[in-house]
Structures are given as C-alpha cells and as structure tokens.
Image (spheres, rainbow, N blue to C red):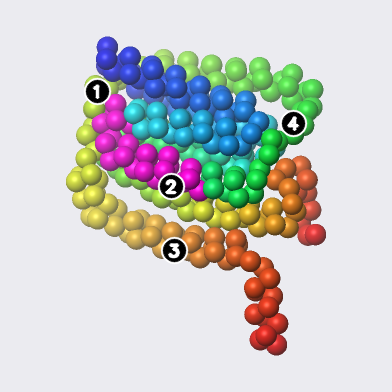
Amino acid sequence: MLHLALFSIFGAICVAGAVNLLVQRHPINSALSLIAVMTSLAVEYLLLGAEFVAAVQVIIYAGAIMVLFVFVIMLLNAGEEERTTGSRVAILFGIPGVLLGGVLVAWTLIQRSGTDEVALGALPGSPTIIGWLLFHDFLLPFEVTSLLILIAIMGAVVLAGKPEAETQQTGKGH
Amino acid sequence: MVPISYYLVLSGILFGCGVVGFLIKRNIISIFMSIELMLNGVNLSFVAFAAQWHALSGQVFVFLVMVVAAAEAAVGLAIIIAVYRNRETLNVDQVNLLKL
C-alpha cells in the first residue's frame, strides 16, 4: 500500500514534469522541470531497491548534466522559442495516433506482465555489490567507458574552443 | 506490491514525452533535453526489468547508460555552442545549411 502510494505520487510528479517540459517555452523552465523528473525518478529507483542507481541519478543526472545544461542556457542567453505551426495533417493524425499507440502499449504491458509484482526494495543494489560487478563481470565495458569519457572531454574542448586561436596557430605554422 | 507493468508504463510515458518533445520543440537545447528524457525513461525500464528477473546486471547497465549520457551531454552542448557561434541562433529551423 505504501509502495503503491509512493509510486503514484512520484510517478505523477514525473509525468507532470515531463509534460511541463513540453509545454514551457523558455528553455530554463524546461530544464528545471527536467530536474524535477530526474529527482522523482531517483525515488522510483529507490522503491525498486536500486540504491546506487538512485544516488548516481541525483549526482550525475540532476547534478552534473543539468548544471551543464543550465550553464549553456545562461551562456548562450537562450530566449523564448518561437512556435512554428505544424502542418494540419500532422496534428489531425499525429495526436490520435500517439494516443492510440500509447493505450495499446500500456494495455499490452498490463495484460501480459501484470501478474509479476515487486515488493518494496525488491532487488537491493547496494554500492558494494554494484562495484563488485563493475570490477569483475563488467571490467571491459567499464574501462571502455572511461576511454569514451576521455574522448568526449577532448571532443568538447576541440568543439567549444575558440576558433580564432586555432587559425592564429595554423597561421604561425605556415 | 506494485505490478512491474506500472513501472514499464511510466517509463513508456516518459519516453513518449521525450519523442513528442523532440518533434515539436524548436529550440536546440530543448530538443537535447527531450533526448535526456528519453534516456531516463529507458533507464527506468532497465531497473524495473532488473527487479523482475533478479539480475543486477540491469542496474550496472543503467550506470553505463548514465556515463554515456554524460559524455553525450558534454559533446552535444559543445556542438550547440559551436552552432550558436556560427549562426547566432538556437532555432533549428534556421540551421538549415551545411556550409555558411
């Protein structure tokens, strides 16, 4: 009962935040509602017992990534977006199509896998056991990921670096 | 006790909101945030299936997805800064030329 109540409350916050992200026109409002979605998703992870994932969700997603987003929004001084009117056919067929598809998928999921119920904190994923898995079973993916991060850092520096400095350097080289 | 399908439906709703935002948003930063929303929806289904099958590898996968999302955010935002520097706009409708 407690599980269902907590799931409903934070699920409602999730959906409300996601819808608010779509409705808001200013990117900073969208970013703040995305933070609400991410923190309430962390609670959903906790309900499933994934403690480590919940902590990492708050630290990396709601912390690091969203700070990066807000920083870029403020750096570029992003204003309100102008709405372009979509084609009439897209509105006429798109909205009923999305609703129909969503109801179909939800109905199938509830019909097919509705019998399996999870208890509160069904599968405890403590940092100890996740760390053990990361450094034993998933050692190669973990190391490859660190390489990916390194490449991403270098790529970000190259892409966002000042182009004038580059041209000056190449000019000196010639 | 909550059926696992509730979590899957919630993750589907989040993913659907992400897809709709990706299609209707015109600001390049909002489009990028919609992609993050889709990734979050997928992560929730990973954790839900991990709880259903009692396999912790699902949670390890979520961790790896988060790391990849962090790398993607860094590179993507750098690309957005580069686009803004060249075009002086964040509206994707006005970014329609490969070359200036």
- Does residue B3 lie above or below A61 as drawn? above
The residue at the far top in this view is A1
Q: Is residue A107 above or below residue B15?
A: above
Q: Are marks 2 and 1 in contact (CB under 8 Å)?
A: no
Q: Tag 4: residue type? A: Arg
Q: CA distance from mark 1 to mark 4?
A: 43 Å
The circle on residue A83 is 4
Chain bearing tag 1 is A
Q: Name the quadrant containing residue A19.
A: top right
Q: Which mark is residue B94?
A: none
Residue at 28% across, 35% down: A50
Circle 4 crowding by C-alpha within 10 Å: few under 14, some 14–19, many from 20: few
Q: Amino acid at mark 3?
A: Leu
Q: Nearer the viewer, residue A156 or A116?
A: A156
Instruction: Tell me the distance, in whole angstroms, between the alpha carbons under discs 1 and 3.
Output: 38 Å
Task: Give SS at disc 4.
Answer: loop
Report whether B9 appears left or right of A118: right
The numbered disc on residue A120 is 1
Residue drawn at point x = 45 percent, y = 30 percent = A36
Tell me, yes or no, whether dots 2 and 4 are on the same chain: yes
Of the two numbered discs 2 and 3 in the rendering, the one whose residue sits closer to the viewer: 2
Residue occupied by mark 2: A64
Residue A40's quadrant in the figure? top left
Q: Name the mark on residue A150.
A: 3
Residue A64 is inside the magenta segment: yes
Q: Quadrant of the C terminus of chain A?
A: bottom right
Tell me which amino acid carries mark 2: Ala
Residue type at mark 1: give it. Answer: Leu
- N-terminal label among 1 and 4: 4
A94 left or right of A5?
right
